[in-house]
Amino acid sequence: MGTSDIPVRVALIGTARRSSYLYGPILAGLSGEVELVSVWGRSEDSAQSLGEGLGVPWFTDLDQLIRETSPAIGIVSVAYSANGVVGLMAVEHGLNVLLETPIADDLAEADAIIRTANVQGVKIEVSEQFHRRPLEQLKLKLIAAGLFGKVHVSFNDFAGHGYHGISVMRSYLGFDARPIRVTGAVKEYDLTPHWSIITGASGPRRETQEHGMIEFAGGQLGIFHWTSVGYDSALRWWRSSRFMAEKGMGITVGVGLDVEERLSTLAPGGQAPLFITVERRWERCDGGALVAMVAHTGDLDLPVVTWENPFRPEAIGRSLQWHDDEIGVAGCLMSLVTAVRDGSEPTYGANQARLDQELILAIRQSAAQGGQPIELPISQG
C-alpha cells in the first residue's frame, strides 16, 4: 500500500462550534483520505464533550495528544481572538496545520506562525474557502483558460467581509498580482430599527461600512466594499463579486445566497455581449449531489469549460450532498493533505492569508489617517 492510500491522521485543536458542526462531518466524509484520531481543548469539559461527540480520545495536554495519537495534521478551530496563539502552539509542537481565518488578527502573530513553521519544516494551509466555492472555481478556470484575457479591475461588492472579500477580489486578478498601495474609508451610520438574523433580536442598529481601493504593480485595481450588517440585515441584501477584463466581464448579482452569474465575452461582429450559460450539474436531473459546474461559452475554440467537484460521488446516491461552503472547506483541507503527502506547497497558504489580512488592515489604517494612501507593506508600529 502506498502512502497516498493511507489516511492522514488528523487532530482537532480547539472546541469552537465549527469543530463539531463543520469539521467533524467533513472529516467523516473524507474517511478514505483522513482519519480523525483525537481532539484537544483548553477546558476538560469542552474537550470531553467534543471528543465523546465525535467518538475519539480527548486531551487538554497537547504533548500527550501527540504522543498517544500521532496526528500529522492539526485543524485549529478556536475563538477568533485565540487563533494566532493556538496556531503558533500547534506549529511549535511540529504539527502541519489548517488554520481558521484570519491566520491571525495581528500581523506579528502571523509572522511568528510562518517563521516557526519554516523552522519546524511543517506546512500551513488556511481555511479561506470563499474562492474555493464551486461557482468561484468555475470562474477562475474560465479566466485561467484565457477566455476573458487579462483581468484589469476586480471588485468585492459586499460578497464577503474582511480577508474573505479581499481574497475573492484578488483571486480574479491572480494571487501572484502584487498590491502596492491602499486607500480606504470607514464610516459608521445609524439604521432604522429592524431584526437581526444572527441574534434573533429587533431594535436600533448601527453599521460600519468599509471601502477600499487597492492598486497593483501591474496596473490592475481591486475595489472592496463591506458593511458590518451584511450577513444579517434585510436592509443590506446586495451580494456581488465582479471583474472587468480585456475580452469581457463577469458580474455576480443576487439577494443573499440566491445569486445569478452574468458572464460575457463579445458576440461575433463585436457589437453585442455574448452571455455564457452556467449549469450546475447534479447526480440526477431532479437533484442529488453536485457533480460539476459547466460553462457553455458560445466560443467555437472553447465551447465548454467544466469544473468537476473533487468530492463528487463515485456512485449515484452514495455520497453526502455537501453545500458550496462545505465543498470549499473540504478543498482547503485536501490542499494541506496533498502538501503533506507530496512535500508540495498548499495552493493558498500562509503567505497569501497574511497578505489578505494585511490589506484589510491597510484599508482601516488609511481610513484612520483621513483617507491617505498607504504604501505596502504597512507599518506595524
Image: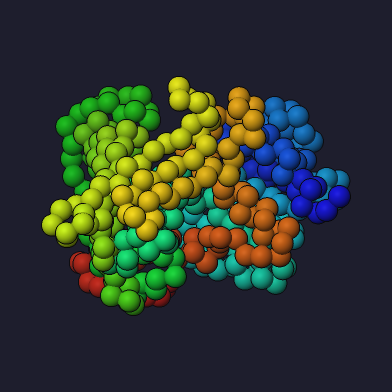
**In x, y percent, where is residue 219?**
28, 75
- Which quadrant, please, contains the C terminus? bottom left
Q: Relative to residue 48, is residue 351 depicted above or below?
A: below
Vertical relation: 194 (above or below) 85: above
Residue 84 against residue 235 in the figure, above or below = below
Q: Which residue is found at the position 20% from the left and 29% from the top?
A: 193
The answer to whether any part of residue 5 appears in the image is yes
The one nearer the camera, 43 or 243, is 243
Q: Residue at x 50, y 26 (%)?
A: 284
Name the spot of residue 165 as percent of width and height, x first: 36, 52
Name the colour scheme.
rainbow
**Residue 143, image x, y percentages:** 38, 59
Q: In the rendering, at what x and y percent does residue 173 appear?
A: 36, 64
Residue 64 in sight: no
Relative placement, left or right, of 243 versus 6 is left
Residue at 32% x, 76% y: name it: 218
